[in-house]
Amino acid sequence: MKDIVEIHWHGRGGQGAKTASLLLADAAFNTGKYVQGFPEYGPERMGAPITAYNRISTERSTVHSNIYYPDYVVVVDETLLSAVDVTAGLNPEGAIVINSGKQPEELRPLLKGYTGKVCTIDAGKISEEELGRNFPNTPMLAAIVKVSGVVEEKAFIKDMEASFKHKFASKPQVIEGNMRALIRSMEEVKEG
Amino acid sequence: MGIRERLSGNEAVAYAMKQINPDVMGAFPITPSTEIPQYFSAYVDNGEVDTEFIAVESEHSAMSTCIGAEAAGCRAISATSSCGLCYMTEMLYVAASDRLPITLAVSCRALSGPININNDHSDVMGVRDTGWLVLFAETNQEAYDNYLQAMRIGEAVGLPIMVCQDGFITSHAIENIELVETEKVKAFVGEYKPQHYLLNKDEPMSVGAYATPVYYMEAKRQQAQAMIDAKGVIKQVAKEFEEMTGRSYGLIEKYMMDDAEEAIILMGSSAGTAKEAVKQLRAQGKKVGLIKIRSFRPFPAEEIAEALKNVKAFASMDKDDSYNGHCGPIHAEVCTGLYANGVFGPKGIGYIYGLGGRDVRVESIQKVFAELEQIAETGQVGETYRYLEVRE
């Protein structure tokens, strides 16, 4: 891993992109990293495009600006590809991970000539099958961990299980569903 | 040795409040400080603190509540932002002149208009002459550490104190933090034992009495003296805090200033971004440095003058404008400080930057240094009243 990895999350208000960025910060924190997790605040409303950010580093980063040259981009809502320049500044050595049932090659033409890795994961489908509802957060989080390697996979799985157990102590069936969604996502993410 | 955690700046301040367990909180919510009373009210509800939480109908009443409670002999706290702070203004003067060491957490935000919820320092700068002590934090860690030191400082000199951080930029960003164990916090902050208080039946007194012209000015002079005395207290409390945590604080923080020829002066979260800019420029062999203001009130005029005396050019960075047609408040006070301390060599300019959440990047700060380099080389200052990265 580089000394500092910077990640952009693109989602729509209400889809949990901010929460996912905070979960990733948590996971990285738990493996001993320095983290920053912060959203870009504005006049948010349900459905409007929103951006959240992560800096994950081995030394504390003192920078408090937004991120302009991310190493990775996560797109929680495929419809944003035509509305937001999601690959702006994206490191060609990095990757973009998109929540979509399509193949990476089908989406590449929408990415304004981005030459790096394009990854897709059908987070909506996984979530509906494993959790019975469309919560793309957990599968998207698992996919970016898999693609970026920013958190070691085994440690990540163990850590997420502990955090689900804590969060859903009164609903054990949700813990299993979330864990299945997480592991499936890491297996099913397509790289192109 | 401390507790490794990750918290947002607002969470960190609420956690400090919980560890201190003050007597009274009077609060009214406003973005981006809302989370502070929100988290704290949960601690009250869960019985983790025994603070009397008074949910009031306005910030004016929040501060009035604190004034009543502190005058009675309690430790009183509040939190606010932006127009909430403006709405407290009348009572801020009362708190300071009644010499009530209330602690107020501020998550700084722009003022209307245009209406905007993001960060700048207009709110705190608007109340800078109310007689409050004012500390600024660069990070969530500093917001927490400043909060732990605040009551000691305020109570020692008998003045209320604001603990400020940048709204959203640190208030809502999760970052690593090292917390102090609660027993240590309690021992460090100690019990509040006011000399004079309303609920002391052995010493009947009145608070907020009328002062005729024969007395008013003496009261204000004493208030001014308390502010002067606070400089020593801030340093002393910081020294004890360093002994406990290893983290050192002063009135200002100097970063790579020893042989600096060009320097910037700023406060809040952008100081961290500016440190990265300085680091990169130093790697290119440029002699640059920065001064971060931690204590805005009292203003460290002497310390800044001392730190700047050998630089060729400097820029004061204001996240706020005074609309006086020539400079922001930090630049005004820095220049006065230089003049008062007999430092006439450095050429100075003022930058207004980061208003209403305008993102401040490493590159933004490097642009300022590029200007300073030119001023240092040519001796030509040019316009001294500048706006950074604005379309015009």
Image (cartoon, helix red, strand yellow):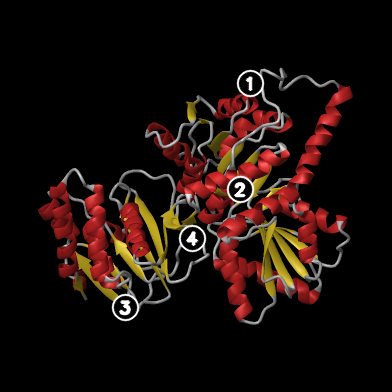
Label 2, label 1: how many angstroms apart (C-alpha)? 26 Å
In the image, what residue occupies the spot 77% across and 40% down? B226
In the image, what residue occupies the spot 22% across and 64% down? A157
SS class of the residue under badge 2? helix
User: Mark 2 belongs to which amino acid?
Assistant: Gln
Q: Which mark is residue B199?
A: 1
Q: Chain of mark 2?
A: B
Q: For mark 3, what is the residue? A: A115
Whether pointer 2 and pointer 4 mark residues with C-beta atoms closer than 8 Å, the reply is no
Residue B262 image point, x, y percent: 72, 71
Label 4, label 1: how many angstroms apart (C-alpha)? 40 Å
Label 1, label 3: how many angstroms apart (C-alpha)? 73 Å
Mark closer to the chain start, 2 or 1: 2
Label 4, label 3: how many angstroms apart (C-alpha)? 47 Å
Dot 4, how many residues are within 10 Å of its Cα: few (below 14), some (14-19), or many (20+)? few
SS class of the residue under badge 4? loop
Q: Chain of mark 3?
A: A
Placement of the C terminus of chain B among the 4 image quadrants:
bottom right
